Each structure stands twice: as C-alpha cells, then as structure tokens.
Image (cartoon, rainbow, N blue to C red):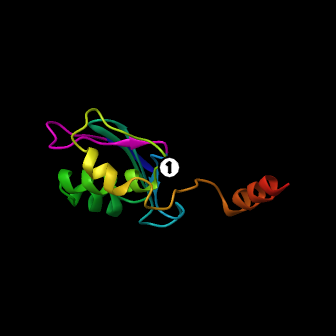
Amino acid sequence: MRWNVLTVTNPIHTFLTSDRPVVMTDGVNRWDSFIIVPIGPTQAFVAVNTIEMERHLQGLSVEKFMILLNDRVSRQACDFVYGDDDKQLRFVDKRLGKGLPQFIASKRLQDSRKGFLRA
C-alpha cells in the first residue's frame, strides 16, 4: 500500500479519534481499498493501493474529508470519542455508537475467535 500522512493547517474542525479509530474498506486487495486512522487533531494516516485512489481522496476538500472521517470514527466507536476541545460534542452525540465497528482480521481469525468466546 501507498502510505502518507495528511496534515491539515488551520482547519475549521479537527480530527476526532475513538476507541475504534481505524477506518477501512472491506479488505485491502482492491484498487479502491484504503486504511485511514486519525493520529492527531490535524493529522491522519492514509494508506491506499493505487494512485487513482490517492488522487480521489486528494480531490475531496479538506472539510469534506474531515467530516467523513469524523463521522465514521464517531459511529463505529463503542464508548469513547476524543477531540482536542468540546466544539464537536453535538456532532459526536448524534453519532456515537450508531454504526458497526470494524474488525481488522481475516474471516478465519474472526470465526476462530467466535468459537473461542463460546467455549
């Protein structure tokens, strides 16, 4: 994958993080696969498979990218969302835990964990 760190200067909002901050596609073997993780209030780790996907993400406005990432991070959080201030508290309150968390592992590992948890 092609790795990069997106750094935003003078953002309107900042990146949020949570107890489940990894945002990714369902698998990483397609041309449009990505992994994105907020790593600070103004930085996000971004990994993509192709230049085309990299250009697609670069084509988004910074504000749109931040809103989409913050939305996903807030929705897939279980209990906690973190920000550098309380300006996005209402945004988080509307979304906290409303989505499905992502589990980063193969189907085989997920199945083995299910069996382990039942034992």
Residue 50 location (% of width, % of height): 39, 60
Residue at 30% x, 57% y is 68
The quadrant where residue 8 appears: top left
Residue 56 location (% of width, % of height): 28, 62
Query: How would you classify the magenta stretch by its main secondary structure?
Result: loop
Q: Residue furthest right?
A: 119
Q: Does the magenta stretch include residue 7?
A: yes
The quadrant where residue 34 appears: bottom left
Disc 1 element: loop
**What crowding class fits label 1: few (fewer than 14 Cα within 10 Å), some (14-19), or many (20 or more)?**
some
Residue 111 location (% of width, % of height): 74, 62
Residue at 16% x, 41% y is 11
Total labels: the figure holds 1
Q: Is residue 62 left or right of residue 22?
A: left
Q: Is residue 63 magenta?
A: no
Report the magenta residues as a range. Answer: 6-19
Quadrant in which the C terminus appears: bottom right
Q: Is residue 80 left or right of residue 62?
A: right
Residue 14 location (% of width, % of height): 24, 40
Residue at 39% x, 41% y is 17
Q: In this view, does 58 lie to the left or right of 24?
A: left
Instruction: Please name the residue that numbered disc 1 is placed on.
Output: 78
The quadrant where residue 49 appears: bottom left
Give whichever of 18, 28 is nearer the camera: 18
Give whichever of 87, 47 is nearer the camera: 87
Residue at 78% x, 57% y is 112
Q: What residue type is labelled 1?
A: Cys
Give whichever of 66, 71 is nearer the camera: 71
